[in-house]
Each structure stands twice: as structure tokens, then as C-alpha cells.
């Protein structure tokens, strides 16, 4: 609804800009043709008319050009903002993962996004300390969640879109 109102407003402003430019061109043509239609004896009477016409024509051209320029710039800015938003979302969605983190994500994905930490250590070929540090880092980044379950810990993959 709001977009319809904005586009209708933009369309009417664009029509006004075109009308203003058209009128300015018409006045410029009149300004050029009038001296040729008047006899040279009454040229002194026409000078104020020429100055006034030139003033109105220049005002019309300035208004028309500035409105057209403003309307064209306003339409191109949202496109740039959309591209910037897409770029920002993409960089948030695709963080740089180390090879060890990528291995953990791959193993978790192949095991329904959760498994025992001891099993992850065995499948990944990590040492216990390396796996603990790696999983702590990934937990801090919000990639995995470790849940104490009895004597061991279950590792769950929190976010899995766009990490491979």
C-alpha cells in the first residue's frame, strides 16, 4: 500500500518535471522567434519582454532539470542499498571456517546434527584437548552447543546453513 502511494507520487512528480521542461522549451522557442516577427522600429518595446521571457525560461529549465535529476537519483539509491544489504547478509551467513571447524561441521551434519563429543573426537582424529578448545571456540561463535549428558557431552550443530 505504501509502495503504491510512493510510486504514484513519484509518477506525478515525474510528469510535473516533464511538463516543466516542455514549457521551458516552448518558451525558449518563442523567445527565439519573437524578434524575427517584430519590425525593427518597435524593437525598443520588445526588450523588456525578451528579458522577462529569458528569465522565465531559465527558471523553467532549472526547475525541470533539478526535479528530473532528483527523481532519477532517488530511484537509483534504493538499488545500491539493496546490494549493500545483500552483501552484508551474505558475509554474515558465510563466515570463514578453519579446516578443523569445517571437519566438525561435516561430521555433525552426517550424524543428524548431534553426537557425543567422544565420538566426534574419534571420527575427526583430534586430540581431546584440541577438540575441547575447538568446540569451545565454536560454541562461543554460536555454531555448536554442548550439553552435558550424564558422564559425557553431546555436541549439537546450531546453525548449518551456508557453512560448507
Image: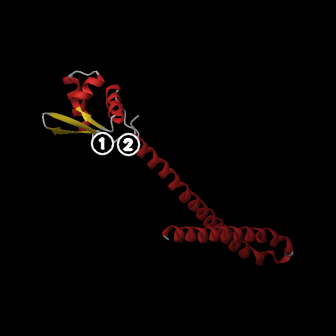
Q: Secondary structure at mark 1?
A: loop
> Is 61 above or below relative to 97?
below
C-alpha span from label 2 to label 1: 15 Å
Please name the residue that numbered disc 1 is placed on. Answer: 158
- Please give left or right for residue 22 compared with residue 65 in the image: right
Task: Using residue 49 as the reference point, say whether residue 111 is left or right of it.
Answer: left
**Coordinates of residue 125 in the picture (x, y in percent):** 28, 21
Query: Residue 36: image x %, image y %?
Result: 85, 70
Q: Position of residue 3 (x, y in %)?
A: 51, 67
Q: Position of residue 14 (x, y in %)?
A: 62, 67
Q: How many marks?
A: 2
Classify 81 as above or below 108: below
Q: Nearer the viewer, residue 34 or 27?
A: 27
Q: Characterize the local packing of mark 1: few (<14), some (14-19) or many (20 or more) Cα atoms within 10 angstroms.
A: some
Left or right of residue 45: residue 80: left
- Where does the C terminus fall, quadrant-wise? top left
Identify which residue is drawn at 66% across, 65% down: 61
Callout 2 secondary element: helix
Which of the labelled discs sits on residue 111, or is there none? none
- Foreground pick, 111 / 64: 111
Depth order, front residue of 11/61: 11
Taking depth in this image into account, of 106 and 130 the one nearest to the observer is: 106
Which residue is at a point 47% across and 52% down the rendered structure image? Answer: 81
Say which quarter of the image contains residue 152: top left
Residue that numbered label 2 is attached to: 92
At a point 33% along the width and 42% down the height, the residue shown is 159
Find residue 134 and report its image quarter. top left
Q: Are marks 2 and 1 in contact (CB under 8 Å)?
A: no
Q: How is the image coloured?
A: secondary structure
- Which of discs 2 and 1 lies nearer the camera? The answer is 1
Amino acid at each position: 500500500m505504501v509502495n503504491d502511494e510512493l510510486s504514484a507520487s513519484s509518477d506525478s512528480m515525474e510528469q510535473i518535471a516533464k511538463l516543466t521542461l516542455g514549457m521551458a522549451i516552448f518558451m525558449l522557442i518563442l523567445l527565439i522567434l519573437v524578434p524575427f516577427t517584430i519590425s525593427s522600429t518597435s524593437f525598443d518595446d520588445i526588450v523588456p519582454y525578451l528579458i522577462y521571457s529569458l528569465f522565465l525560461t531559465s527558471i523553467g529549465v532549472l526547475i525541470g532539470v533539478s526535479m528530473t535529476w532528483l527523481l532519477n537519483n532517488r530511484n537509483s539509491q534504493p538499488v545500491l542499498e539493496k546490494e549493500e544489504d545483500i552483501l552484508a547478509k551474505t558475509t554474515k551467513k558465510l563466515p570463514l571456517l578453519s579446516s578443523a571447524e569445517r571437519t566438525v561441521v561435516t561430521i555433525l551434519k552426517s550424524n543428524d546434527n548431534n553426537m557425543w563429543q567422544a565420538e566426534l573426537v574419534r571420527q575427526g582424529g583430534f586430540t581431546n584437548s584440541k577438540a575441547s578448545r575447538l568446540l569451545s571456540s565454536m560454541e562461543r561463535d554460536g555454531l555448536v552447543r554442548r550439553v552435558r549428558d550424564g558422564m559425557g557431552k553431546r555436541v549439537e550443530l546450531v546453525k548449518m546453513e551456508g557453512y560448507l
